[in-house]
Image: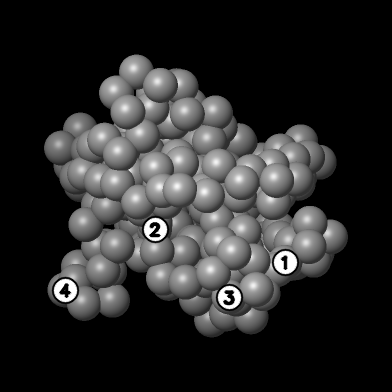
Amino acid sequence: MTSILLDPRRTVVFAGDSVTDCGRRTDPDGLGDGYVRTLYDDLSDELGERRPAIVNTGISGNRAVDLAARWAADVLAHDPSLVSILIGINDTWRRYDEDDPTTPEAFEASYRALLDALTCPVVLMEPFLLPVKAGQQEWREDLDPKLEVVRKLAVEYGAILVPTDVELTKAAAAVGPATLADDGVHPTAAGHRALADLWRRYVLD
């Protein structure tokens, strides 16, 4: 994987929901102000002109089925050398705020459509939840089966798994969940720094 990240002719695409989006559609650089920007800055400082092109295609509110619908135009069109995917929390959240659930089976089918279309290395980041608000702990009933889907697909497709939920939950036990995600879902600046560090740890080390 390091060879991809040491080649300016390569393109790394980050796909996902608001956690990835982070205002990238109003950012002149198209990166937003979250973990993708943090990774871009880190790699730029370390690699300079050897850094690959980095593309952020996250869209706030997306579920796995939404990614599948825009996959060709938003991801495949970039001819990516590496694709990093972080999706799933909205597949859980919509059950609780809009009574619009996504079954684990439907989530898996959409996620498989993403992976089946790729011919490059893939990074799967676990969707995560750091309960802060009343009732959020109950979301685990819905999220945990989706986490198992992501973990299973990482093995099946030979993808690199970034155990985001596991590692951020550990970190939250030490610093408090609101330090990393003040609403339990959307990372703070510290949360995005932690996401970027986890990505580097599992993808680059």
Residue 60: percent from left, percent from top: 41, 70
Mark nearest the camera among 3 and 2 is 3
Residue 133: percent from left, percent from top: 41, 48
C-alpha span from label 3 to label 1: 11 Å
Residue identifier under label 3 = 98
Identified at 64% across, 66% down, the residue is: 95
Residue identifier under label 4 = 28
C-alpha span from label 4 to label 2: 16 Å
Identity of the amino acid at label 3?
A: Glu
Q: Is residue 27 above or below residue 205?
A: below
Mark nearest the camera among 1 and 4 is 1
Identified at 39% across, 58% down, the residue is: 20
* Residue 166 falls in image quadrant: top right
Mark positioned earlier in the residue sequence (1 or 4) = 4
Asked if residue 124 can be seen in this view, the reply is: no
C-alpha span from label 3 to label 4: 33 Å
Mark positioned earlier in the residue sequence (3 or 2) = 2
* Residue 85 falls in image quadrant: bottom right
Identity of the amino acid at label 2?
A: Thr
**Tag 3 secondary structure:** loop
Residue identifier under label 2 = 20
| Residue 43 falls left or right of residue 75 | left
Residue identifier under label 1 = 102
Identified at 38% across, 27% down, the residue is: 172
> Few, some or many C-alpha atoms within 10 Å of disc 2 (few <14, some 14-19, many ≥20)?
many
**Tag 4 secondary structure:** loop
